[in-house]
Image (tube, coloured by chain):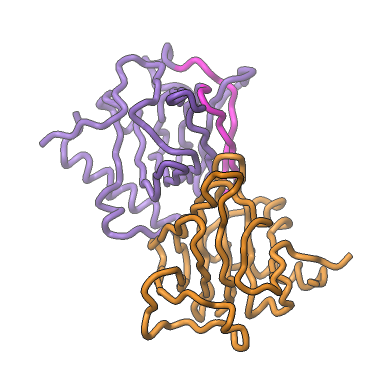
Chain colours: A purple, B orange
Amino acid sequence: MLSRSAVEQAQARAAEILASAGIALTDAERAGIEVADFGLEDLERTGLEVVVYENNDRYCAKELVLFPGQTCPEHRHPPVNGAPGKRETFRCRQGLVRLYVEGEPTPSASARPPQGDEDYYTVSHEIELRPGEQYTIQPDTKHWFQAGEEGAVVSEFSTTSRDELDVFTDPRIRRIPEIEG
Amino acid sequence: MLSRSAVEQAQARAAEILASAGIALTDAERAGIEVADFGLEDLERTGLEVVVYENNDRYCAKELVLFPGQTCPEHRHPPVNGAPGKRETFRCRQGLVRLYVEGEPTPSASARPPQGDEDYYTVSHEIELRPGEQYTIQPDTKHWFQAGEEGAVVSEFSTTSRDELDVFTDPRIRRIPEIEG
């Protein structure tokens, strides 16, 4: 469980990173930044900070912030009521993000899964995204990503987001953050 | 018809504005910036510069650039094959954009339609968007927008974009740019 003060600290840090990338937020957006530790209680290593700009029944747009070296753990977006799962395009805005997807393993991949959690990272086809570069992830395919040493800001454009339906490889993970109090 | 050199000049100017907003493009994106004069041959007054990041059968994301005072003329996105028309969210990233939509006319609206074209601007409910502010336009509803004195950068998140189906109030308009040779 995340403490309220840990959430506020991470929100402030994420807001600062977004500001450094020239991305303006409203006060309400700043106060509503989602801080996800995926239930692993090790936010610096495994976590994600998210601003949801719009999520309706047809499309979704978010800004993702990753602290230096932070990892968003492996997951996929399964079909929903017979319709294909979420398709998403990641566009790097600042920093460097390494994305791992299904496909031929990259022999000398640069990122490493968080130590001790290697069993829950099964795909290793690497795509490096620097500012201005983007990649589209197909529905229901496994992926995970990790920021470089300076962290990263990534715009996500996608179909409707239903985070609660995401399927993670690590069975310990709880996608929806639990926050104390 | 736009001359090739007019297009290149507008592309360079749009790229510069995007860079000043901290938005990185690839070389291919820079070379592919769409310059639309809507067939009115008066780009400074009526026009739009567009970077399409992604446009697939489920969602679309673009960056829109408006030069100072430039106007995107009134149009709507009609239903397509029985499905609702395009829904789109405009998020201001830099500058000021004034958006006009259906609804109660705003008595002292700040923007004016391009002189001589007033007949083709019929909606005047004003929404001002500054950096970090956004607004979602419902399908098949008329809208137009104009940048303030310093121009504007606007992110557009939407359903699939089919520009060729847009319905403009001004019958002289041709949405798809014609570029000489």
User: Whole-percent x and y of residue B164?
Assistant: 68, 56
The reply to whether the magenta stretch includes residue B137 is no
When asked about the image quadrant of residue A40, the answer is: top left
Q: Is residue A123 magenta?
A: yes
Q: Which of the pair B128/A30 is nearer the observer? A: B128
The answer to which of A67 and B50 lies nearer the viewer is: B50
- Decide: is B174 above or below A180: below
Q: Inspect this view and state whether residue A107 appears.
A: no
With B111 as the anchor, is B35 left or right in this view? right
Say above or below: B22 vs A178.
below
Q: Residue furthest front?
A: B82
**Can the viewer see residue A178?**
yes
Name the outermost residue toward the top: A119
Taking depth in this image into account, of B47 and B31 the one nearest to the observer is: B47
Residue sticking out furthest to the left: A181
Magenta stretch, residue numbers: A121-141
| x and y percentages locating residue A155 in the rendered image | 48, 46
Total marks shown come to 0
